Amino acid sequence: MPGGLEGTDAIDENPYLVVVVVEISSPSAKALRDFNTPRTNRPGGGTEILRATHHWGTSILQRKTNAMETIVLQTPAGKSLKSAKAQFEAREIELAKAPSIGESLKLASWALGNGLVVQFEKVMDKLTETDKEHSIVMAYAKVKADLEKPIAKDAIAKPKGKLLDGYRVAQTDKHHYAILHNSDATEFKEPLDRLEKGYKSFYYWWAMRGINLPMPTERQVAVMTNHGEDFRRIQKNLTASPVLNDSFAARRENLSVFSSKRGDQAYTTLETTSKTLWDQGFIRKEVIKGKSDGIPKTINMRLPGDQDFVQAARIRALLMKALEDEWEATAMSNKVARQLMFASKLMPTNVTIPEWVQFGMGSFFETPLQSPFGGPGSASPYWLPRFKEYNDPKAKKYGATPLETMLGVVTDAHFRAKPQAGETPEAVTRRARAAAWALYYYLAQSPENLAGLRQYFKELSRMPRDIELDAVVLKAAFARAFGCEKDGKPDDVKLGALAKRWIDFSKDQTIDADAVHKQIRTFYSQMNRPVGTTPGTGGTRPGGQPGSGGGQGPQ
């Protein structure tokens, strides 16, 4: 690792540590106990494995090898941590015992904040039958009606010019997004569904605050392009935002652009070290199912060594698919929100909006990386731990005081900061993004602060067209919006009080997926990678084929 990297920076930038969070069927208490008990402590021995069903099939998970480790997340009581859907169902049963509109709205907000849009609609649809005069229910009903209005198939905001010549359109009558692509793929249901989920989540969140934002009359456009030169060419010719998860938003052109392939170091390392498996005849899309499909005919399943080889292929297929899935989910949910902040008229497209606002809103609505929970309105399991660490007084990554930290956000100074000693540019960007998320999240929590945030949007909307705004102007606009002025000028005392409330609020925040990130830190602290080694699944079969034992370093 580069010298000086510590904590989350080291975790995020270490390509040899590949962290994947996968939702599996809930194991029985006995299966979980056996899985977590080392075979040396178990009478009669044991195998320390768990057969688990997941979204793509079935996998046999090994508790620990020299190349990887599987942790089943548990509650303090020792039970497996339930999925968001299972938790919703349990809460729904409790609500049915003593129904009330207040508790129903709480459950609906919780469901939306954990990415359960269908379950959110289920709760709110019931309220439209019993409490249709409630202001929030009325706002929801209007959004639901607007979402159900048909859009003409050719109603797509097509980009002008020849930049996307040759791209084809993938769309349906049921989706509010169309995808422009240059691939040979014929099936785009999954990305269209992701974009639709982000679209609905955005408007539903505002409706839950009693606010109905205008909805575009045309389909929004997402571009999916080949990773590499074509992606960079499009980025160069648009008003592109900074790249996040191989994606960016183009403010003026009202586009979201996504690479068709994940390209970060962790995924690339895993892809490279897994290539031998696919070259030997394993079929990724089939072997992940956990059945006999996708296995080369040269494999003899009666041989223990070949069984290990198949296990390695199945686990690699699962890791890669899960990494691809979370990357796309995070990128699309983030970019939909960034795109809709302009399409919904919250912001004009002809004004240069500070990056902290754009990223703050995008990350507020995104599905976080490395987490089974999270969505609009919830504390981000990805950004909250990072902000807390960077803002620790011992770290001194932002500023000496809460005011200095907050002004660094609202003036975009954190985004323009230079790397500190031993620090990478990526670490600087990540730190700025964590603070942007944290401030936006705080301001969106209370009606009073949300009103100030909307006023801040209006202040920015009045700025001159397409002119970069300096720190003085940005500070003044923020101070006006939140009533932090004295004699018509920004009042550092009032701003400092607001900043302190923000920092105090952030310190008190917790996340459902905290166990995930504590375990990630544990993994990192246990890593002991000798310089110059190459990670693998562990060991090799004759001919250089990766197997499941005797590896050179953990992943």
Image: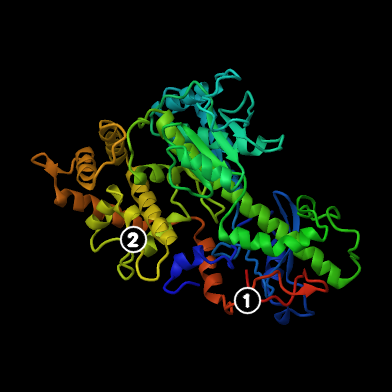
Label 2 sits on residue: 418
Compute the Cα span from label 2 to label 1.
31 Å
Above/below status of 312 relative to 112: below
Q: Identify the residue shown where x is 46% and y is 37%.
A: 238
| Amino acid type of the residue that numbered disc 2 sits on in the rendered structure | Lys
What residue sits 85% from the left and 68% below the top? 306
Measured as percent of width and height from the top left, residue 319 is found at 67, 58
Q: In which quarter of the image is residue 230?
A: top right
The mark that comes first in sequence, 2 or 1, is 2
**Residue 115 appears in view:** no
Secondary-structure class at tag 1: loop
Q: What residue type is labelled 1?
A: Thr
- Percent x, y of residue 109: 47, 40
Residue located 40% across and 42% down the image = 361
Q: Which mark is residue 533?
A: 1
Front residue (pair 524, 23): 524
Q: In the rendered image, which quarter contains the C terminus?
A: bottom right
